[in-house]
Amino acid sequence: MKNKIKSIAAAVAATALLGTMSMSVSATTVDDVVAAARGAGFLEEYVQTLQNFLNTSHYTSSQYDTMIGMLSSAGDDMDEIAMQYFGKTVAQMKGEAQDEADKTGKPVDDSFLVDIVDQMKDEDVINIVNKIIETGKDLGLDITAEKKGDKNYIITVKDKDGNIQLVTPVGKLIDRTGYAENVSGTDEVNGAMAVSVAVTAAGCAGALALMLKLRKNEE
Amino acid sequence: MSKKNVKLMIATPFVMLAVCGGIIVGTGAVPVQKISKALEVVFSADSSHGKISEIKYTEKEVESQLDDGNKIVYPSFGLQYATLKIDSIDLEAPVIFGSSEELLQQGVCQYIGSVVIGEKGNVVLDAHCNTFFLNLGDVKAGDEIVLTTSYGEFKYKMTESKLFKETDNSLISPTKDDRLTLYTCYGNLLGPTEDRLAVICELVEKKFYN
């Protein structure tokens, strides 16, 4: 559940970022967008994802402004939940977690964000993701959210030419690194299965025919 | 023995062969595929890792300068921009920026939420446990791990290994120190698992070509 929440927040952040990329007009830099994401309380992993994406993308300052607007809006939504249930803004909660991490020397405990996301209903998250997807369409981006297990999504962003710009998990951030499913091998297995079924069926039919013939001979 | 019974006796072995053969092919297809994949991993250290044709990525590199003056090249998602070498387990593999099911079949993938190699922080790489990271668990403390890019070479020393659950993000989170985190599935070579093995390494030497 916590991961789902994180993933939702991540998806919202990632989509918000992506969606904003191809819009608008202004005088802002990548650093401003990253600072806005950080200020809105997004997990550092998602802030880093945004920064990595923007490092190789070129947008106008107005487009950056749009991104900031999207991030702020997403941050406001989360702030509303945070204030309602915890009496603090996301930034305040993140600041406290950062202070604690500085004291202990351990990584920042991001469970506060999970707690916030936990308070959100599934429909709320899905609605936000859908809005972002629709916004992406308006901007010429093809954003898709593929459900991968319980409350986990993979968000894929493509440009108008179908080139993948970003794939980011929403929910579980850890990759599935178990046995690698061989895509081409799957067809081979399916083919072998079909042959197996056909040969076995033919064999069974033959056996039945032999039994009937044998019985007839005995009579 | 009648003529009819002779025909039946001749036909019976073929019928039985068809039934048994069909069953053997059906039950053996998946295991054979898995074994062949494992053999492919073991005997194809220098196999090519071609991109999956249907997937299109925008291959871009953007040169930039770090605060310390060293030059770095930012890769776009899906670009192979480094090589990972671990002599102790005889591994040399391509490192791809970003991760997806398709990319994991082509090489070692870098978590998109981690810093680019050469930047300060936690570089997080992962790969399948039955392919590139088959022997990750054999890496011992003190072993050298080398990441080579077009802009520099970065040497790490393995410090510790940890087991963690797939729901635990703490080891892939950003860090203030320069480190490399490698992880893969643990405990089940031929299927999905919730357990992960992480190998944590500290940066011991960095050489920018500039």
Image (tube, coloured by chain):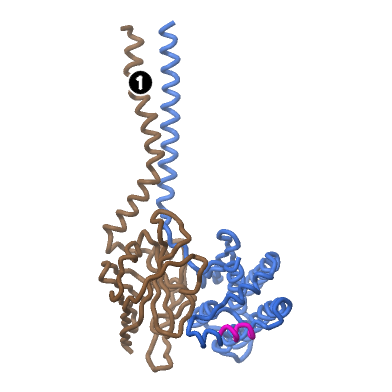
Chain colours: A blue, B brown
Residue A42, compared with residue A170, is above or below; it is below
Q: What residue appears at the point 63 percent right and 89 percent down from the top-left corner?
A: A26
User: Can residue B68 be found in the magenta stretch?
Assistant: no
- The stretch of residues the image draws in magenta is A91-98
Q: Is residue A162 visible?
A: no
Q: B26 or A121: nearer the eye? A: A121
Q: Residue furthest front?
A: A104
Q: Is residue A186 left or right of residue B159?
A: right
Q: Main secondary structure of the magenta part?
A: helix
Residue A200 location (% of width, % of height): 42, 31
Q: What residue appears at the point 52 percent right and 77 percent down from the top-left corner?
A: A45
Q: Is residue B138 left or right of residue A27?
A: left
Q: What residue appears at the point 41 percent right and 55 percent down from the top-left corner?
A: A182
Residue A20 location (% of width, % of height): 62, 79
Q: Is residue B88 visible?
A: yes
Instruction: Locate the C terminus of chain A and report the quarter of the image it occupies.
Output: top left
Q: What residue appears at the point 47 percent right and 74 percent down from the top-left corner?
A: B172
Q: A97 or B122: nearer the eye? A: A97
Residue A122 location (% of width, % of height): 68, 65
